[in-house]
Image (tube, grey):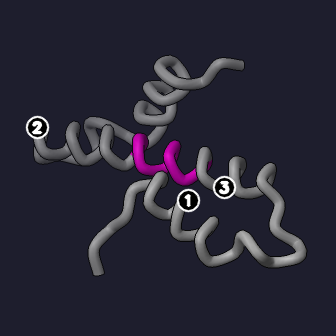
């Protein structure tokens, strides 16, 4: 199964659930932002691994720091 971007998942979710009684855009926004964050962190980790061929050199915490520094506005 091919992976989807956070935006693709967001639109698929909206298409499938828009007419549901409990549809809530706030929850959709929250879920899509979290999914995008996960994808950015995974991409960072994969890129570091591809370069170093040693995942222990680039721990997940470093990817989390990268995300927070680059994208987090709080």
Q: Which residue is drawn at 51% across and 18% down?
A: 69
Check whether the beta carbons of the residues at disc 2 and disc 3 lie within 8 A of each other. no
Quarter of the image for residue 18 reads bottom right
Residue 19 x %, y % = 76, 75
Q: Which residue lies furthest to the bottom in this view?
A: 1
Residue 41 x %, y % = 42, 42
Residue 73 on the magenta span: no
Q: Which of marks 2 and 1 is nearer the N terminus?
A: 1
Alpha-carbon distance for marks 2 and 1?
31 Å
Alpha-carbon distance for marks 3 and 1?
8 Å
Element type where label 2 sits in the image: helix
User: Mark 3 sits on what residue?
Assistant: 31
Q: Main secondary structure of the magenta part?
A: helix
Nearest the eye: 70 or 3? 3
Q: Which mark is residue 10?
A: 1
Element type where label 3 sits in the image: helix
Check whether the beta carbons of the residues at disc 3 and disc 1 lie within 8 A of each other. yes
Residue 11 x %, y % = 53, 61
Whether residue 65 sits left or right of residue 4 in the image: it is right
Q: Which residue is drawn at 47% across and 20% down?
A: 70
Placement of 33 over or under 70, stated as above or below: below
Placement of 10 over or under 42, stated as above or below: below
User: Mark 2 sits on what residue?
Assistant: 51
Give the quarter of the figure containing the C terminus: top right
Q: Which of marks 2 and 3 is nearer the N terminus?
A: 3
Q: Give the range drawn in magenta.
A: 34-41
């Amino acid at each position: 199964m091919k992976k989807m971007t956070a935006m693709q998942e967001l639109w698929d979710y909206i298409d499938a659930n828009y007419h549901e009684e409990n549809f809530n855009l706030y929850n959709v926004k929250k879920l899509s932002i979290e999914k995008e964050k996960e994808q950015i962190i995974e991409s960072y980790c994969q890129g570091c691994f591809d370069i170093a061929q040693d995942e222990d050199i680039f721990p997940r915490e470093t990817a989390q720091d990268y995300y927070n520094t680059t994208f987090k506005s709080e």
